[in-house]
Amino acid sequence: MLFHIPSSSLYQSDVPDEVNTDSGFACRGSDCMFCKVKEELQWQPKQRPDLKIRSIALNIIERCNMRCHYCFAGKGDYGFDSSMSMETAIRAVDFFTQDQDDLHIVFFGGEPLLRFRLIYDLVHWCIREKSDKRFTFALTTNGLLMDQEKLDFFVQHRFSLRWSWDGPLLQGRQRQLHGTKKQSSAASDVIGSKIRRLSKGLSELRSFCLRATLDHNSLSLAIENILNMICSTDFRVAWSRVSSSDSQLRFSGEDIEQYCHVFEGVVSALLKEKDYPSLLRIRSLQTYVRVFHSGSYHRNFCGAGLEYLSVSTRGRFYLCHRFTEDEEESLGSLEDGFDMKKIKAISRHRMMEDEPCQSCWMREICAGGCFHEHKMGTGHIMTIDPFFCQIQDTEMRQALRVYLEMTVHAPELLE
Ligand code: SF4
Ligand code: SF4
């Protein structure tokens, strides 16, 4: 198979051994397959991405009922310990729907279920007062306050839900309940059994994903823990490393090697069983396999700052939820509108005209990566963190491995 970088497509071919894939392909005379591919794809230069905010994270509360030592928001309070008023929430919805018909609203915190009443009121307000607009809703939660009644509401309003759960082996080690000093093995049991108890409703949501965070102390248990998460539920699973500039938490080069090894280990274990449905429940694999199969590409890694931003409790705009209250990455406010100088710089950066992105084999899929990971690794959102690229490289190569096996053993699943 040939991987065509500009379109992220795979081509089946009888490439002779002597072809040197590093130095490119020389024309092989009449009917040259490489020339044909080049001609067919006629790659157009990308358009500079514009500002069109389709999605906002509403930080409805900067406070949390858990204390996870790896939290990017300090103690879950971003140093403010404040709440968004209904008036600010309404102003935000008004602001972002003034020139468009659709808006995706992510309720974020802190722990947003501490403000369930505001979520309930705002959803009903949107439906009642903005009936000419289309809304979709999402929630990111630790799930401690989730119950059947709230879940029914989220199902009724077609929410997407992301539930942070570190898995049976790690939840208790890494996350404490607020107000306790002890490791909360109870939190692990409570959350795990709650997810199983609510699984029917969770599967009726627009989408649902479990998300684990791995710190460097937990890497030795990570493969078993993740396989356990995948095999004990039917839900999509995602995991990531701690993203922090704190030297106590930051991953070393050795940790990154081990983290990549975890990804490979999980994939190998499931490939050995030919368990392709479970492999496709790993969120990043699912995304990349879809990209390879459809030959699509990403204009943006995540849309932060151009299609998506976060609104703080006080109505200030930030690059994304992880940058809330980081004044360096503020992009304006409900009062003052957008900071267009910063937004133009982000748009330019996403064109990937600079190295190392410009000559990266993953550039059309990764599209410059995560600003937050870069900032935590290098101190600047636009200075690429090589550890981030190393992880991307591992995930995409594993996705290629899964995809190629599936084309042979499970082509029906790809469709
Ligand atoms: S993997 Fe790294 S170098 Fe490649 S596009 Fe992503 S951020 Fe840029
Ligand atoms: S910058 Fe990183 S954390 Fe923020 S939305 Fe993008 S991928 Fe997510």
Image: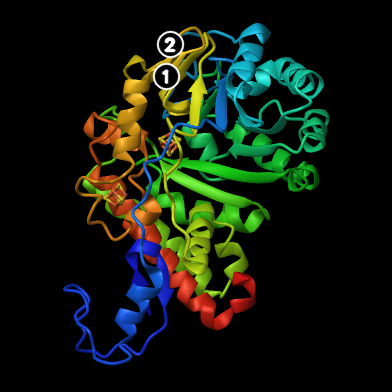
Q: Residue at x 37, y 21 (%)?
A: 340
Task: Give the percent coordinates (x, y) of residue 74.
Answer: 42, 19
Q: Is residue 232 left or right of residue 73?
A: right
Q: Which residue is mark 1?
A: 74
- Give SS at disc 1: loop
- Of 28 and 106, nearer the camera is 28
Q: Is residue 140 left or right of residue 311?
A: right
The quadrant of the picture showing ligand 2 is: top left
Task: Give the percent coordinates (x, y) of residue 86.
Answer: 67, 9
Q: Is residue 54 left or right of residue 199?
A: left
Marker disc for residue 79: 2
Mark 2 nearby-residue class (10 Å; few <14, some 14–19, many ≥20): few
Q: Amino acid at mark 1?
A: Gly
Query: Do the numbered discs 2 and 1 sit on residues whose CB atoms are within 8 Å?
Result: yes
Place residue 354 in its image quadrant: top left
Q: Residue at x 30, y 80 (%)?
A: 35
